[in-house]
Image (cartoon, helix red, strand yellow):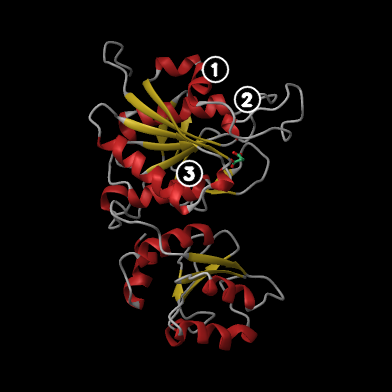
Amino acid sequence: MTNLSAPLPRIALVATGGTIAGAGAEGEPSAAYQAAVIGADDLIARVPQLARLAQLQTEQLLQIDSADFTDDKLLTLARRVATLCDREDVDGVVITHGTDTMEESAYFLHLTVNSAKPIVVTGAMRPGTALAADGPANLVHAVAVAAHPSTQGRGVLVVMNEEIHSARDVAKVHAMRLDAFASPHGALGLVVEGVPRWYRQVARPHTTQSEFDITTLGALPLVGVVAGHAGMRAEVFDAWVAMGARAIVYAGVGGGTVPAYLLDHLTALRERGVWLVRATRTGAGPVIRNANAQDDAHDWIVTDDQSPPKARLLSALALTRHVDTTAFQQVFYRY
Ligand code: SIN
């Protein structure tokens, strides 16, 4: 029950761009628009319901299409969210973000922001000018979740389309529909009548339990991702090595199977010190160590069930601390 005399929670809203801040010509099809053009203050001015949920402090940290997120921008975002969470006059943080790389930023925050305060990422599949725009409802739900006391300590959440997902699991799985986000093990909860209703707990460590500390980190170690497909070529791995990659996540076919014709090449790369991290391109399910590749013999790492883009981030964080095979592998089993 809401206590009407209690002061409203103080939520910091950090805007970074994306379709939720997009605009097109009124009446045009919703795919014809420009992302990242509406400012944070205009965004909330269009949703008066927010004022009943929280005292909002807005800031425009970035104004970009989320495809333009670089590791430097990710570090900037994580540091800013950590600073806001440390403040006594902030009870929670909502981040508006483009949906295309939302799961990556959310996961990075989940692993690096040392706070139990609610941190919620949201966005929109349609700009505000579209018929049946989803941004206003997503924003109201994100603020409602961030403002609710039951959200404490659940790690970073993605709230989209009335669902509450853990940053660890969520992925954008559809390019167009409003129900574009899904988690292989299911959402943590739903927003029901404007209130979070929880159905699952997060099992893996995050935020306050995470070992990763980016406060003094100048840059993330470079980790590449190579897509697996029939007819794939060894030279793509070489390109990452030439750029200085310390590890390459192989988004492999099936259970992360490496083509037999690449084995010698990848063995030689490992001998030069480059880690190979086997993932699956299927979108769900674990890659099992020593099952369909001899990981012990090759000194490779498997991702458990982590997606290739998130495995890139977890590998980069692991390489800020761990150097031996056992420790690197354990990071994927732990997180
Ligand atoms: C973006 O990711 O910035 C554009 C697409 C979107 O937000 O849905």
Q: Amino acid at mark 2?
A: Gly
Q: Residues within 10 Å of mark 1 (few under 14, many from 20)?
A: few
Which residue type does callout 1 highlight?
Arg
Please identify the quarter of the rendering in which residue 264 is found. bottom right
User: Left or right: where does residue 323 sit relative to residue 250?
Assistant: left
Tag 1 near tag 2, CB within 8 Å: yes
So how many labels did they put on this image? 3
Residue assigned mark 1:
46
Is residue 225 in sight in this rendering?
A: yes
Residue at which label 3 appears: 187
Distance (Cα) linking label 2 and label 3: 26 Å
What is the C-alpha distance between the residues marked 1 and 2?
Answer: 9 Å
Instruction: Look at the numbered disc 3 and give the secondary structure of its residue.
Output: loop
Q: Is residue 174 above or below residue 315?
A: above
Q: Nearer the viewer, mark 3 or mark 1?
A: 1
Q: Disc 1 on helix, strand or loop? A: loop
Q: Is residue 95 above or below residue 307?
A: above
Q: Which residue is mark 2?
A: 128
Residue 257 percent location from the top left of the image? 58, 76
The x, y position of residue 94, in whole percent, is 41, 33
